[in-house]
Amino acid sequence: MDIRDIIAKRIAQEFKDGMLVNLGVGIPTRIPGFLPKGISVWLESENGIIGFNGLAKKGEEYPFFIDASNSFTTILPGGSIIDSGLSFGLIRGGHLDYTVLGALQVDEEGNLANWIVPGGRLAGMGGAMDLVTGAKKVIVATEHCSKDGKSKILKKCTFPLTGLKVVDIIVTDLAYIEVTDKGLILKEVAPGVSVQDVIAKTEASLIIPPNVPEMKLN
Amino acid sequence: MGKLKSVQEAVQMIPDGASILINGFYQQGAPEDIIDEILVQKKKNLTLMNNDAGTATKGLGKLIYAGLVKKLICSWCGLNPLLPELVEQGKIELELNPQGTFVERIRAGGYGLGGILTPTGLGTIIEEKGWGTRVHLGGKDLLYHTPLRADICLLEAYDADWVGNLIFRRTQRCFGPIMATAADLVIASVVTPIQQIGALDPDHIMVPGQLVDVLVQQRR
């Protein structure tokens, strides 16, 4: 299985029917494809859509309807269009059940860095800082290590932060980790991965409970 | 019909050095006809406020590429590769706002409020650069931001009547209803033929016409 699908599949199991959620670019956009039977959620898009429903078919694009990735989109029956003030009122005001987004770095205190690489091209934070500040639960979906093999789960983030003490759950291709006041608790390992593997590939300290089950992905 | 102007006449009302709120998310909701005319009339030293920074060929990005902009306030500029270079060279001043902070600052400007207090951005570049100021109120740390207002607001609407009442379609709406409250001169570029007074259902109007000063009829 594509490791990004492992992450998306595990996070999909957290979703409950009828939730309002915002999914970041990359791995999180795979989650709707893995929702358990009978579970559907309202997808929120920062530019003012509740209930967007995937890309418009070729030839059926409506010129005034795009999603937060600049693609022509569609809306579910029962969905709604709102202005940016209400959109961020929902986001910052605690009306969003989950936000799922990627990470460059995340650390033991739940600090998140995901909007700029030092020395990299400047792009701006967009809605990310509001999302991690206001959502009821912040779920990070990321590969455990960067492309050069370095742990993305650190004792302390070194990149510019998106939010202070904001992350609740970290799901990677190796592990499901809960962020608590006491530190990071290793709750589950990915199929075929040992607790020792996870410890070896994690710079941050992990709290290891007596029993760490394997993720159930079906 | 007193609010109707040609796009040339409308842009003649914008002085050099103006501050301009431009609606749009990926420039959807932005009036391309008005932006193109600003290029033609070469308005200079503009301060622009928009969610993103457009692209080389779309929206306010064209004004940045043409060197007409001295300052930009936005939340994201990932599709405008020239902008970081201009910032580095000191040719353009950039102020980043989290998107929710950006829209609320504009709302504060338009609604007569003294600023906003938000938890967003604490401990980040927003605080480090002094774009927001940390205060401790009601037992909470928050960032204070000043209101945003502009001389001009530019937006696109789908339907309008001769009062200037506006209706948007889908994500054309985004910042429009809020930006329209926060400028001295509001110019709307209208997609469909402007309608008789009374033709629009008052329950459907998204910007009351009293906020809109100038209507430009798009030619499609």
Image (cartoon, coloured by chain):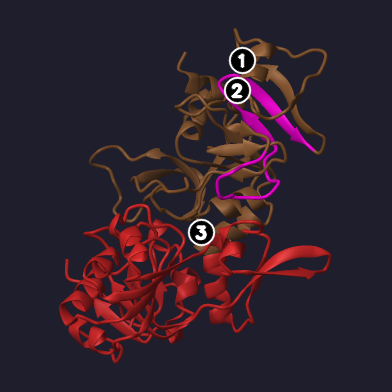
Give the labeled residue for mark 1: A190
Q: Quadrant of the C terminus of chain B?
A: bottom left
The reply, left or right, for residue A207 in relation to residue A44 is: right
Q: Is residue B28 above or below residue B167?
A: above
Secondary element at tag 2: helix
Secondary element at tag 1: loop
Q: Which chain is brown?
A: A
Q: Label for residue A82?
A: 3
Q: Is residue B165 magenta?
A: no
Q: Is residue A56 above or below residue A171?
A: below
The mark that comes first in sequence, 2 or 1, is 2
Tell me the quarter of the picture where residue B33 sits: bottom left
Q: Quadrant of the N terminus of chain B?
A: bottom left
Which chain does the residue under circle 3 lie in?
A: A
- The amino acid on which the numbered mark 2 sits, given as a three-letter code, is Arg
In the rendered picture, chain B carries what hue?
red
Q: Nearer the viewer, mark 1 or mark 3?
A: 1
Q: Label for residue A211?
A: none
Secondary element at tag 3: loop
Which residues make up the magenta segment? A156-180
**x, y (%) of residue B96?**
48, 64
Using the numbered discs, state the Cα–Cα distance from disc 1 to disc 3 in whole angstroms: 39 Å
Which chain does the residue under circle 2 lie in?
A: A
Using the numbered discs, state the Cα–Cα distance from disc 2 to disc 3 in whole angstroms: 31 Å
Q: Label for residue A10?
A: 2
Question: A64 and A204: which one is in front?
Answer: A204
In the image, what residue occupies the spot 77% across and 33% down?
A183
Can residue B28 be seen in this snapshot?
no
- The amino acid on which the numbered mark 1 sits, given as a three-letter code, is Ala
The mark that comes first in sequence, 2 or 3, is 2
In the image, what residue occupies the spot 31% across and 64% down?
B86
Question: Which SS type dominates the magenta stretch?
Answer: loop
